[in-house]
Image: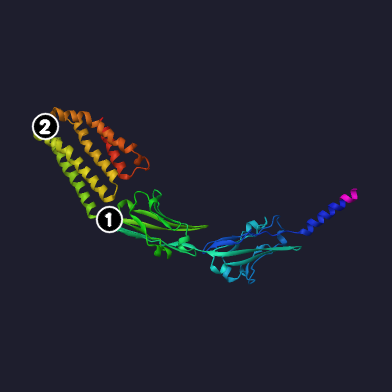
Amino acid sequence: METDLMSCLYLLLLMVICDGFHVHGPSGPLIVQLGGSVMLPCFVETPLPMQELEIEWKRNDSETLVHLWQDGESHPDSQNPSYRERAHFFIEEIAQGNFSLFLTNVTREDAGVYKCAVYTNHDSDETLIEIKEIGRLIVSGAHVISAYAGEDITLNCSVDSHIPAENIEQVLWMKMDGEILVLLYEHGEVQTDSSHERYMDRVELFSAEERNKGNFSLRLKDVRTDDKGLYTCSAFSGAFSDNTTVEVQQLGFSSIQVGIFVLCVLGFVIGSLILGYFSYTSFKNKDESRRALAIQLGHVLCPNITMAIVFILWGVTDGFFTEAATCSALNGVRILFLLWIALHLKTFEGYPRQIINRLAIQLQYAVISVVVYSREYQNITPLPRTRQSCLNETAVIYVTGL
């Protein structure tokens, strides 16, 4: 009985020794992007003795030597010139049985069947790896644009692909600061409703004929100062993706915006400096005449009315009408608030004084509540710059007045 058991163990050991090792490769063909990199898998489950190991990578169709490991070291000098400095071993992994090849800067000529052959003093085995398709999805067009506000500009984006344009899954235009979706092309259709409200009805792609040629440039109409920044055009198709960037910078001001700036300066100089000086003088001299009162009213009315007009004009030119209307309303009700804390409030009698006393605070709170709690503003985070500035301005008024 013992003899039979020993015989079985001996036969089992003999089968293991004769079985040698087995070289494994990928489960199927590889699809590689043109100009990209790819790893061609080749490995054994049990590490082999390094001193007798030889690994040979060849093209199976032409016997072209791609790379060689022999005598414990890599031999790049033996490579075919077309693979020199492009085909590499993972040298630190060879001792663990990983003989994979890393191929960079893939060209069309790299498509084909590769053979990974592994030799020791007692055995050898090989596996075949096929690069079935060299795909390409290259997005180009990076450039810098300078423009004036109100102009129409084109952000270039060209998609070079072996895939027909109608089969490209997605082309995405994004504004990087804030991760704002500018325009989406998906499954052969331009999704105009996907655009952020800031870009709604202001962006479009070129015709279907141009898109079939790979032209996915973006036409941006009526450029605003807020449009300044970095944009990306990204294309996706299966495992392939690529992107390019376009920077919009040095946005000049339109004639309307220059006029708005001049109006701001005039409002500040006349309303704040000149009338402020006369208002301070009348206060210092304890002048309670009608002229002093008129100066005080002018000091309150002129800057706020000017800024209300400025915000409305800025909203019309830059498209942020809701924010501009809010800031204009705040400047309007601030007039009542300033009169409420004015030194000459006692000069108002009857109905005007009741309006100032009863509505100054309530209107301020009402306008701010509309801004903060309306559904439209809750969906936008963070607040746009114009809205933040007018709310900050109001906060300063409350601190000063209370």
Work out whether residue 119 or residue 360 is closer to the camera in this orientation and state it. 360
Residue at image x 59%, y 61%?
30
Find residue 220 and report its image quarter: bottom left
- Whether residue 68 is visible, yes or no, is no
- Residue at the disc numbered 2: 285
348 left or right of 127 in image: left
193 left or right of 354 in image: right
- Residue at the disc numbered 1: 150
Could you tell me the amino acid type at mark 1? Gly
* Residue 207 pos. (x, y %): 38, 62
* Residue 176 pos. (x, y %): 40, 51
The stretch drawn in magenta includes residue 354: no
Work out whether residue 313 or residue 205 is closer to the camera in this orientation and state it. 205
Residue at image x 59%, y 60%?
39
The C terminus - image quarter: top left
* Residue 155 pos. (x, y %): 37, 59
Find residue 146 and report its image quarter: bottom left
In the structure shown, which secondary structural element does the residue marked by tag 1 occupy? loop
Work out whether residue 2 or residue 99 is closer to the camera in this orientation and state it. 2
- Whether residue 370 is visible, yes or no, is yes
Instruction: Give the mark nearest the N terminus, 2 or 1.
Output: 1
**Start-end of magenta stretch:** 1-5
**Picture colour scheme:** rainbow
Could you tell me the amino acid type at mark 2? Asn
Category of crowding for the residue at label 2, using alpha-carbon neighbours closer than 10 angstroms: few (below 14), some (14–19), many (at least 20): few
The Cα atoms of the two marked residues, 2 and 1, are separated by: 50 Å
In the structure shown, which secondary structural element does the residue marked by tag 2 occupy? loop
Examine the residues drawn in magenta and state their main secondary structure: helix
202 left or right of 351 in image: right
Category of crowding for the residue at label 1, using alpha-carbon neighbours closer than 10 angstroms: few (below 14), some (14–19), many (at least 20): many
